[in-house]
Image (cartoon, helix red, strand yellow):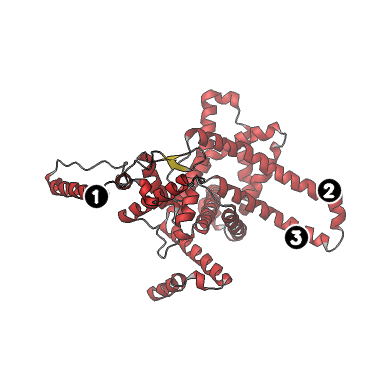
Amino acid sequence: MEKISRLINSALWDIDLSTLPRWRASLLHALRIAHNVIGDLADGQLTLRAMSLVYTTLLSIVPLLALSFSVLKGFDVHNEIQPLLLNFVSPLGEKGGEIVAQIIGFVENTKAGVLGTLGLAFLVYTAISLVQKIEQAFNHIWRVRRHRPLSERFSDYLSVIMIGPILIVSAIGLTASVQSNTIVEALSSIEPIGSIFTVIGILLPYILIMIAFTFIYIFVPNTKVKFRSALIGGLIAAILWVTIGWGFANFVAGSEKYTAIYSTFATLILFMFWLYVAWLILLIGSSIVFYHQHPEALTRDSVPTKLSNRHREQLGIAVMQLIAERFYKNESPLSESGLIDKLGIPSYNLERVTDSLVAAGLLILSEEEQYLPAKPFDTTPLVEVLRAIRENRNHVPTTTENHHFARSEKLSAQIESHLDQALEGKMIKSLIE
């Protein structure tokens, strides 16, 4: 097994993609992405977060649907919720219909007048907590440490909860109206146009699933996601959804063994199992999107690369140099994605460095999320950049009262003194001179 593993790793990683024909390079790149996604699954974080989302979904599904139900009721299309849920639980077969009937019954019994102000607030919070959990899972996959501000979270999450169902129902209604249009019906009777429309009708549900996944992959992570990467992830996730859903319906939900073992709990167990599979598919798709957008994050051992202290200092100087060049040449400032493109490094490594520079008061992040000098670069010593990178502001300094640290403290002071002497008189602007 070790020999086979070495051969696979050699075939995947010891070849320079630039020396291969385009189709072979694309295939090898796809295999590298698959290797790292499987590594993420083996690491256990994706499965753990999928299980966490199952628990949150069970708590949040009724409040979430109650809010969506109230919005759709204003447009007199609230009856569309049940077909949507039936489509989601279709792999459960007849048991899915029982679950949907129970959920719809709970939703219809949820009345704001009975709940009161406190109960209504808890209802909204429970629904929002599900979207927050999804964002946290996506941010973990994307190695994003920053979270949306509280006000932004609230508005964005409510947008998803309120507007999302309207868009879904509108898309389904538009599809149905187009299919029932007299012109479309007339064209359907003409071959080969009729066969084309039949194929489109078969593929349309899968296309809608792909669009929904793509939208989630773009909107949910607290970082800029490229449309092409999100579309590829959405396509693969949609294929997995359909394929695994078919397998689940035929080999899991159709089996009588679960009923024999779990008796009346069988329906609930199968529902929870399908929820777990569904969330896992969504997270796998997000992992594919991340690696497609950040090929520099692909590694042989599937472990995210971490910079040494020396490389962090080099990266900090490179960042300041790029920002200084743009500033003094009156060019548009760089955003985080611009710095990533220029430096060719993963976002999670850059973020740690830029956060340190912002915390030290050397950079500011504008409303357009672009980095600008916070101090005049022609009068700010370069040594401040290195000190900002070295200092971990989230870490409590080790006390020097312990005698074991006495000598190391003295040596550290000498190193700092030599650093000051080596960079004496050098300002940040000197990086571009």
Q: Is residue 394 visible?
A: yes
Q: Residue at x 14, y 40 (%)?
A: 401
C-alpha separation, residue under disc 1 versus residue under disc 3: 70 Å
Between circles 1 and 3, the one closer to the viewer is 1
Across and down, in percent, residue 262 comes to 51, 51
Q: Residue at x 71, y 46 (%)?
A: 172
Across and down, in percent, residue 104 comes to 63, 38
**Chain-order first, disc 1 or disc 3:** 3
Judging depth in this view, the residue of 335 and 95 nearest the camera is 335
Quarter of the picture containing the N terminus is bottom left
Judging depth in this view, the residue of 404 and 283 nearest the camera is 404
Mark drawn on residue 73: none
Amino acid on which the number 1 mark rests in the picture: Leu
Judging depth in this view, the residue of 46 and 217 nearest the camera is 217
Crowding at dot 2, Cα within 10 Å, few <14 / some 14-19 / many 20+, comes out as few
Crowding at dot 1, Cα within 10 Å, few <14 / some 14-19 / many 20+, comes out as few
Q: Secondary structure at mark 2?
A: loop
Q: Residue furthest left?
A: 403
**Chain-order first, disc 1 or disc 2:** 2
Q: Secondary structure at mark 1?
A: helix
Amino acid on which the number 3 mark rests in the picture: Val
Residue 112: image quadrant is top right
The residue under label 2 is: 181
Q: Residue at x 37, y 41 (%)?
A: 362
The residue under label 1 is: 419
Q: Secondary structure at mark 3?
A: helix
Between circles 1 and 2, the one closer to the viewer is 1
Relative side of 417 to 59, left or right = left
Across and down, in percent, residue 366 comes to 48, 38
The residue under label 3 is: 199
Across and down, in percent, residue 48 comes to 44, 51
**Chain-order first, disc 3 or disc 2:** 2
